[in-house]
Amino acid sequence: MLAHVARRGAACLPRLGRPLVAAGVHALGPAGRPFSSDAGSGSAPPPTVGSGLSPAEQAGAPVSHDRFLQYLISKIRLQGPLSVADFMKECLTNPVAGFYMHHDALGRAGDFVTSPEVSSLFGDCVGTWVTNVLLGFEGQGAAGAGAGAGAGGSPFRLVELDPGKGTLMKDVLRVARRLYSGRGVSLGDRLSRVQLVEASPTLRAVQAAALQVDPATGRTPDGVAVSWYGSLEEIQAEDRELAAAGRPAERFVLLAHEFLDALPVFQFVRPPGGAWSEVLVSLSPRLVAELDPVGPAGGEAGSGPALPPMPELSGEDAEHDLCFTLSDGPTPNSSLVSMFAGPGGGAPATVTHAPASSSSAAAAATTTTTDPAPEDDRIEISAAVADVSARIAQMVEDHRGVALIVDYGVDGPLRSSVRGIRQHQFVHPLLQPGTVDLSADVDFSLVRRAAMHMPLAFDLDATTGSSVSGLDQSLRAQRAGEGQEDPAAAAAAAIASRLDAAAPLRRQVNVSGLMTQHEFLRDMGIGVRLQQVLKLDSARQAAAAKAAATGEALPPGAPAPMSREDRAALISGVRRLVDLDQMGQIYKFIAISPSDGSPEPGPDALPYPFRPHAPAGGKPRE
């Protein structure tokens, strides 16, 4: 099943996906512009043929659900069924109707919550990790330029993809400020700038407020410049421009917290003895009959042969105007199976969700199995995840930075995991497009292989969902000219071979093994931090009680003790983050750091507490 409705008891769901611009989507405004009152305002999107949108709506005004659904229906009737990836992109980042373009879905009043919102102690742990990495950079200067400051005037910078409300970056800066202050150093003297990749104008404004960015200067109170970008490529392009001008970009720490799960995915099904067909989003048979009673039942109205609904989804789809269908054979995107699930990919994992009636937090948690794939196989692949992973790793190699990726997923290919989320419940992904968050689990084995071996020269177009790069096109043309029957398969095989571990390309980076959130927070001392906070509050409670009993006044500016409810919320929040039957097991951490080229990474090759990846059945190297 593509999705099941589920609920984690009475608590809000941890965020299972927050979309942002996929790799290749251009900024809504000028690249890298410091925040100002009009930051994020972009030019009007071009009119869409057959969209039926008014000029105001085309200029970016929000549209209703019904208007957006009519747009999708018109697009499918004119152009044919959409890939799952294209459907996700339309629903999440369409400039006038995308789920995250015009409202804030974070928090208990929204659709999901994230770990930084659950407890500030999460940000304390990540902030300490980030600052330790920055301190490890001390004395090394800008990447490849010896000692000295980088382009921003200070040695280092921070990058975050999809910062949400800015809570995590705010916590990271708070911790870094405290730790640097303890060394007698101003944060602004060590950190030149913060670069945030965010598509939503609404969230850009929220992030600016969280970081206390001065609209006039574009800087925080510490003097750290803050800039917004529409995609990671824009940061890379800016870095190349700086290098060409003889001003190398600074070393960095990059954070990608629940970013990859929001990138679009393709899905494919292979019947016994058959070829891979693509899962598509089309018009439901009921809607087709209403729109074109004489058209071919079950297909796009008046546009071609019928595409039958997938049997196991037909019941769930029946109430919707859209449905999942299968292509009648391989599509151009089918080459992605060989390209990214290629050699040694393993059997796709099955992701299941507990039914809505489940009251057990353990039963409600996402579970994953990697049983041998059945004959009637299916697989889910995100070319955008591969592209972003390769780009992050290329930045790490070019500037000797370090990246931390946090998300939910598994260490292997997935069968199907796309789900909708609304008001802290799982819902069908086709329910009321544009009003539902869509996300998918992350294949961390793909992250690792793409980071180490995927050439950026392929430049997969994650914006359009196309899997055809310049090299792919030339290979197709060459094979076709030689009279071979299956040029697409030959091209895909050639590309897949470049992604294999034995391929010539070996990016100079180390990619760690996976850590669960439970393990990372434990090793970063969240338990000790909780005890310290509670002990400090107990002292404040005693001081307040003594003052009340003696009539003495508390010192001016003395922090007030927590209420009983706040103490309980703090403890329950930490438990929620680390418990294996809540968020502790679902979320995974992985780090990418520069390599010295050694085939056997040493104990200091990765920042604490990460360790090298252990091959299947093997043990991590000490």
Image (cartoon, rainbow, N blue to C red):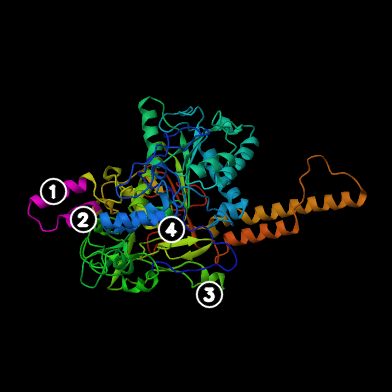
Residue carrying label 4: 438
The residue at the far right in this view is: 550
In whole angstroms, how far apart are the C-alphas of marks 1 and 3?
A: 54 Å
- Between disc 1 and disc 2, the foreground one is 1
- State whether residue 513 appears in this view: no
Please give the label number shown on residue 357.
3
Location of the N terminus by quadrant is bottom left
Whole-number angstrom distance, CA of label 3 to CA of label 2:
45 Å
Q: Kindly identify which residue carries mark 2.
A: 493
> Badge 1: few (under 14), some or many (20 or more) residues near its Cα, within 10 Å?
some
* Amino acid at pointer 2: Ala
Compute the Cα span from label 1 to label 2.
15 Å
Q: Secondary structure at mark 2?
A: helix
Cα separation between marks 1 and 4:
36 Å
N-term mark: 2 or 4: 4
Residue that label 1 marks: 477
Q: Percent x, y for residue 585?
A: 51, 63
Q: Secondary structure at mark 1?
A: helix
Q: Name the N-terminal-most of marks 1 and 3.
A: 3
Name the residue rendered at 28%, 57% in the picture. Answer: 77
For the record, the magenta segment spans: 471-495
